[in-house]
Amino acid sequence: MRRILLLAVTCCVLASCGSKRGNKPSATTHVTDLKTTPYYYLQLKGTIGNEHITMQLIKSGPLLFKGYYVYDNVGEPIMVWGNPDDDEIVLYENTDPTEERTFKGRLDSAGVFKGKWRGKGTTYEFTLQPDFAEATPLDVYYSVDSVNLLPGNPNTPIGEASNCIVWPAAATEPSVADFIKKSISGGRQVADVAGFVKRDIDSFLVTYKTTARDLDTTEGIPATASWSADADMKVVWNRYPLLVFEYFSYEYTGGAHGNYGAQYQVLDLEKKKILTLDDVFRADYKKVLVPELEKAFRRIYKLEPERPLSSILLEKEISPNNNFLITDKGVAFSYTPYEIGPYAMGQVTLFIPFKDIESVLKK
């Protein structure tokens, strides 16, 4: 078995968060040399044209960047992902499937991302600067491993798994750091972060090895005999006191396609609480949210008013679920494949501005 384990290097150092609700963490920021930092998290701020944006960017693999950004006046998270391209980085947006929108530029050793954004039929230059003034400092841990199913066979199928997580940096105020750690680990005390990262990898590969006993190779090795699993965390929102994580997982264990999905977690760092819908909304929220979710779906998927939701979904209406995220401007509900729509539709995430649902928001 070969194993590559690459641990995090802290990419930013901040003073402790303020103790009162709404207080900013210290603006003192230090970004290490990213050329020598294998994996890192950056909060970047700048403009596209005249629009101010904030980006949460993670280098989550040797050749992989993932994250989200928002237009500050809108607050709707837009997913980005991409790879290095020679000495530049290209980030693709998960927005309009009919038009490619990209950030392409250089990310220097100080964390400054500078280049051109292309989309909506135009091009804007951008310069995004690291800004952790109101953010919680985070480290990034990554691990990958693989195993041959049939050792000694040159055509052996391979099982491969990777995992990437964020973890509170050493500069984080201790009680806040402890809360974040327990939220990520499901309440467990984690003394060895590297071991925690590769625990699920090892479990997946052990399971994969057991399939060798049942593999029929009399007519050759089937293409479905190679398995893979990938898990990662993203930062969706990071402004004290709210910190929002995405937990994404993908598994292929044979069959026509793999299974995947993303779950979201909203942390109130001041109250040391994982927020639920009851913390955000009044008791009668469903009757207000259902039509707003339908409105958001029709806008994104360009569904005509005369066509019912059931013409392309598995449901007649979209109800709020427990898989939600929050920014300063609104709330989004996210539905994994098959939850409300067919697999080919993918994960459906619907954003509702707070201004449209003020009547059911708790103050």
Image (tube, rainbow, N blue to C red):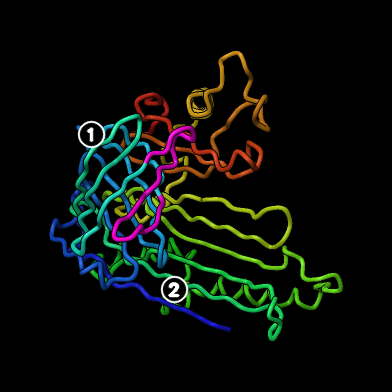
In percent of width and height, residue 115 lies at 24, 47
In percent of width and height, residue 22 lies at 22, 46
Q: CA distance from mark 2 to mark 1?
A: 42 Å
Residue in view at x 38 percent, y 29 percent: 353
- Of all residues shown, which one is farthest toward the top? 306
Q: Badge 2 is on which residue?
A: 189
Q: In this rendering, does residue 284 appear at all?
A: no
Q: Earlier in the sequence, mark 2 or mark 1?
A: 1
Residue in view at x 34 percent, y 48 percent: 237
In the rendered image, residue 96 lying in the magenta stretch gets the answer yes
The crowding category of the residue bearing disc 1, from other C-alpha atoms within 10 Å (few below 14, some 14 to 19, many at least 20), is few
Q: Nearer the viewer, residue 201 or 328?
A: 201
Q: Which region shows up in magenta?
A: 81-101
Q: Vertical placement of 294 versus 350: above or below? A: above
Identify the element where label 2 is drawn: loop
Quarter-of-image position of residue 28: bottom left
Q: Vertical placement of 100 versus 196: above or below? A: above
Disc sitting over residue 51 in the figure? 1
Q: Disc 2, disc 1: CB below 8 Å?
A: no
The crowding category of the residue bearing disc 2, from other C-alpha atoms within 10 Å (few below 14, some 14 to 19, many at least 20), is few
Residue in view at x 31 percent, y 32 percent: 74
Q: In this rendering, does residue 194 appear at all?
A: yes
Count every numbered label the image shows and give the total: 2
Q: Vertical placement of 71 versus 284: above or below? A: below
Identify residue type, mark 1. Glu
Identify residue type, mark 2. Gln
Residue in view at x 54 percent, y 38 percent: 348
In percent of width and height, residue 203 lies at 61, 74
Identify the element where label 1 is drawn: strand
* Placement of the N terminus among the 4 image quadrants: bottom right
